[in-house]
Amino acid sequence: MQPAIHEGQLNGKGFRFAIVASRWNDFISSRLVEGALDALARLGVAEKAVAVYKVPGSFEIPLLALKVAGSKKFDAVICLGTIIRGQTPHFEYIAHEVTRGISQAGMETGVPVVFGIITADNLDQAIDRAGVKLGNKGFEAATTAVELVNLYKEAFEKDEG
Ligand code: DLZ
């Protein structure tokens, strides 16, 4: 048996993307934004088809992601932030709520909302995951977004003919 396999292409031409990024730990988070923009450009997305929204901390990402996804102005939303485990219980609370909220934004709107949040035990680990290109979680999240918009278009919008 050879069933049809549906897989998204890595071609961003004609699609619109929003990045929702947190400023907390900005020396790392801004590298995620750079990585995401680099990936989108490499995959053929036009500069005017990308908008970047900034929030103070990762906890604020889910609601903005929900509103941006619900605006129907974008084909996918890429969420970027850096949560580092500290001496307080904040890490668990924030990481849990951000993860749940980002998932909810996608489920409620039907728009792909991609999780590009670094959750790290320490600063070194976070820096490692915000490296250049392939080692950059922003780059990976944007690549995932491009693949997903192509998959949804191919699987659900094309005429079967
Ligand atoms: C308060 C807080 C803490 C302790 N740690 C982080 C973090 O590691 N990463 C992050 O993005 N944000 C953190 N914040 C800020 C919260 O996300 C939020 O901005 C504030 O609690 C205000 O709602």
Image (cartoon, grey):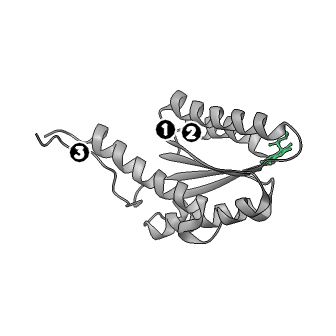
In the image shown, does 109 or 138 lie closer to the viewer? 138
Cβ–Cβ under 8 Å for marks 3 and 1: no
Q: Which residue is under mark 1?
A: 111
Quadrant (top left/top right/bottom left/bottom right) for the C terminus: top left
Q: Is residue 122 visible?
A: yes
Which amino acid, mark 3?
Answer: Ile
Residue 34, percent from left and from top: 64, 67
Residue 40, percent from left and from top: 50, 63
In the image shown, does 83 or 145 lie closer to the viewer? 83
Which residue is at a point 78% across and 60% down the rendered structure image?
A: 123
- Between marks 3 and 1, how big is the CA–CA gap? 22 Å
Residue 30, percent from left and from top: 72, 63
Which residue is at a point 43% across and 66% down the rendered structure image?
A: 43
Cβ–Cβ under 8 Å for marks 2 and 1: yes
Q: Could you tell me which secondary element the residue under label 3 belongs to?
A: loop
Specify the farthest residue to the top: 108
Q: Which residue is under mark 2?
A: 69
Q: Which residue is under mark 3?
A: 5
Residue 114 relative to residue 148: left or right? right
Which amino acid, mark 1?
Answer: Val
Q: Is residue 21 visible?
A: no
- Between marks 3 and 2, how big is the CA–CA gap? 27 Å
Dividing the image into four quarters, tell me where ligand 1 lies: top right
In the rendered view, would you say 10 is above or below 75? below
